[in-house]
Structure formats: C-alpha cells, structure tokens
Amino acid sequence: MLGDQVAIVTGGSRGIGWSAALRLAQAGASVVAWARSADKLAELAAEAKRQEVAGTLETAVIDVTDRAAIDGGIEDVTERLGRIDILVNNAGITRDGLLMSMEDDDFDQVLTANLKSVFWTTRAVSRHMVRARRGRIVNISSVSGLSGNAGQANYAASKAGIVGFSKSVAKELGKRGITCNVVAPGFIETDMTDRLPDQVKDSYKAMIPLRRFGQPEDIAEAIAFLCGPGGAYITGQVLTVDGGLLT
Ligand code: NAP
C-alpha cells in the first residue's frame, strides 16, 4: 500500500511512535524512526527485522528540540532515500503540575518538545514535499488539547497549538498536493500514562464509552489510514481516537 514511500516518524522508540513506525513499514514504506534513545531504537529496528516487514525500517538518534539535528536528519534522509512522502510528528513529553506552581521551565520544555519541534520538522520537510507536489503530514495532538485537562496547562496548550498549526498548514499547502491532519488520542496505554496513579486511571476508564484504554496500535491504524489511499481527500481534520471519551 505504501511501497516506494519514505516516511519519518518522530518519537519512534516507544509507545505510539514505535507502533506507527512498524505499521507504516508493514504497509511497505521505507521508514526512518527518530528518538533520543539509541538502545530503544535498536530494539525497534530488530523488531521490524523479526516481523519481516514489507518495507524497511531505519532509525536515527535525533532530538526534536534541536533544530540543527532535525535539519541534518532530513538532509540525510533526502540524500540517501531521495524523498520524503510522509511525516508523522509524534514525539512528545509531559511535565504535569498545577498552574500556580508550574515553573517556566516546565512550560518551555513542553512547548518546545511538543509544538516548536513540529514547526521545525514540518517547515523543513515541506520544502521537499512542495517540490514533489505530494505529501502526507500527520501530527499527534491529544484530547487534552481539545478539551483541556487540570494539571496539564502546558501540555494542553502545546497540543491545542498543534491543531491550529496543522489546519493552517493544510490550507497553505493543499494546493501543492500535501495533506496535513491531526490524530488526537485519548488514553493510550504507554509509558506516558503508566506513571499515573491507579485511581486516576480507573476514573478515566469509567468515562470511556468503549470501557477500555487504547493501545498504541489503535493510533497507528489511524495514522496509516491518513497516510494511505483512504486519506487522499482528507486534510485539516482532527481525528479523535479515544474510545468515545470526548463524545
Ligand atoms: P511515550 O511512550 O512517552 O513516548 C514518547 C516518545 O517521544 C518516545 O519515543 C520518546 O523517545 C520521544 N521523545 C520525547 N522527547 C523527544 C525529543 N526531545 N526528541 C525526540 N524524541 C522524543 O509517549 P506516547 O504515549 O507513545 O505518546 C506519543 C505521542 O502521543 C505524544 O505526542 C503524546 O503527547 C501523544 N499522546 C499520548 C497519549 C497517551 O495516552 N499515551 C494520549 C494523547 C496523546 P526518547 O525518549 O527515546 O527520545
């Protein structure tokens, strides 16, 4: 389905990004997964090999808060693989805390890792996509960015920012054959949510109509859909994948 297509997935060393990188490689794409943890990325590459994915899966240690590293990573991909068709901006962090005690650093770090990084990668990749007159960009937001969440003012601001950013990019680049959409996950079982107290998890589960937490694969399927033939005429949209939480 995605044969011949080159994809970059940020934050591929764990959780949703890990699943998305594998899913796109299973669909035949040549995937380059980025993250900071070299050992985890090596595990991802080994898993792709073990699964004998239809495409290929390479990795690169890139910190998305480092603009020079991003530019270098994109140059490397275009030089070696010749193109970039798909960009999945998935890397993200939380530094939760109540507003009154939130430090400047907690705000700045989250905004840089979750939002400014998306600006940097999208700007750099768009230059190649515009020349090719094709491209699919999928940015990972969160239900927190759509409805807000106590204790996550910084995170919710970054994720809401992704929505406005993506809709603007969709309007700007649509005429060049490039789509830009958002996937907004609900509560997905990954390292990010693992650290929440059981009491908080139970209260979330009770609010989810499907009565289960999502798995990284649930999000990877939505990403693959938007990058595949089904996503050809969809742009500027937010696809909420949350078991009905926000309904
Ligand atoms: P996770 O398990 O904590 O994984 C986060 C990924 O981002 C890791 O691969 C991490 O890799 C990477 N990352 C973080 N900072 C980075 C940086 N500066 N440079 C490069 N990579 C970086 O989180 P997840 O749950 O899979 O979340 C993935 C995305 O979905 C995030 O944007 C998150 O906000 C969003 N989301 C998650 C949920 C959920 O319930 N889990 C819900 C809504 C939205 P390294 O540490 O190796 O760099």
Image (cartoon, rainbow, N blue to C red):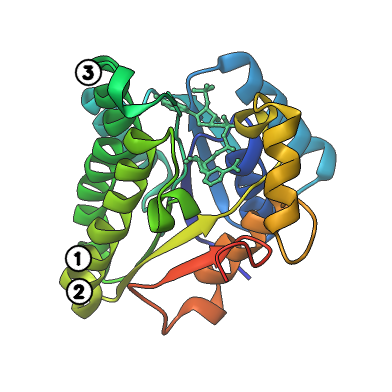
Q: Is residue 65 above or below residue 232?
A: above
Label 2 with label 1: CB-CB less than 8 Å? yes
Q: Secondary structure at mark 2?
A: helix
Please name the residue that numbered disc 3 is placed on: 104
Q: Residue furthest right?
A: 50
Location of residue 200 in the rendering, given as x and y in whole percent from the top left corner: 67, 36
Which quadrant, please, contains the C terminus? Answer: bottom right
State the mark number for residue 213: none
Local packing at callout 1 (Cα closer than 10 Å; few below 14, some 14-19, many 20+) is: some
In the rendered structure, which amino acid carries the disc numbered 1? Ser
Location of residue 57 in the rendering, given as x and y in whole percent from the top left corner: 62, 40
Residue occupying image coordinates x 22% and y 63%: 169
How far apart are the alpha carbons under marks 2 and 3? 33 Å
Residue mark closest to the camera, 2 vs 3? 3
Q: Secondary structure at mark 3?
A: helix
Q: Is residue 205 above or below residue 103?
A: below
Mark 2 and ligand 1: say if the CB distance to the nearest ligand atom is below 8 Å. no
Q: Quadrant of residue 221?
A: bottom right
Please name the residue that numbered disc 1 is placed on: 168
In the rendered structure, which amino acid carries the disc numbered 3? Asp
State the mark number for residue 171: 2
Question: In the shown orientation, is residue 153 left or right of residue 16?
Answer: left
Mark 1 and ligand 1: say if the CB distance to the nearest ligand atom is below 8 Å. no
